[in-house]
Image (tube, rainbow, N blue to C red):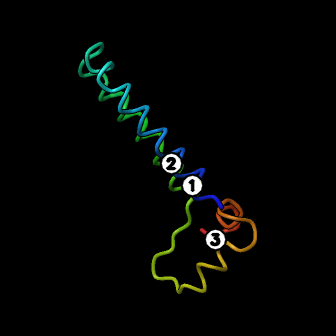
Amino acid sequence: MAFLPSLLSSYACVFAVIQITPIAISSISWRASTIFAAFCAFCVPILFSFFPETNQLELEDIDHLFERGGVTDCVFRAKG
């Protein structure tokens, strides 16, 4: 059920980047790269905060990780 909204938002973001990048490069040249780097740096803390580690977990354990409150609930209850 959530596949379509996530797919549409992904395509919308890619379309926006494709439309904005040539204008940004012609207007502000090399500084466009720093803007993209800033967005990537902004995403790193979000990834580490809201996506739990699933390395070396059994498939059933991963299911239990997400069954109660979604991603944010298991992150706030995690030990360490």
Q: Is residue 20 left or right of residue 27?
A: right
Q: Which numbered disc, 2 or 3, marks the residue closer to the eye?
A: 2
Residue 49 image label: 1
Residue 68's x, y, as percent?
75, 71
Tag count in the figure?
3
Residue 57's x, y, as percent?
51, 83
Q: Which residue is mark 2?
A: 45
In the picture, the quarter occupied by the N terminus is bottom right
Q: Which residue is mark 3?
A: 79
Q: Are marks 1 and 2 in contact (CB under 8 Å)?
A: yes
Q: Amino acid at mark 2?
A: Pro
* Alpha carbon distance from label 1 to label 2: 6 Å
User: Which residue is painted at 37% across and 27% down in the image?
Assistant: 19
- Tell me the crowding category of disc 1: few under 14, some 14 to 19, or many 20 or more residues within 10 angstroms, Cα based: few
* Alpha carbon distance from label 2 to label 3: 18 Å
Element on which disc 3 rests: loop
In the picture, the quarter occupied by the C terminus is bottom right
Q: Amino acid at mark 3?
A: Lys
Q: Which numbered disc, 3 or 1, marks the residue closer to the eye?
A: 1
Residue 17's x, y, as percent?
39, 33
Position above or below: 27 against 69: above
Residue 55's x, y, as percent?
46, 76
Q: Earlier in the sequence, mark 3 or mark 1?
A: 1
User: Which residue is painted at 66% across and 71% down in the image?
Assistant: 66
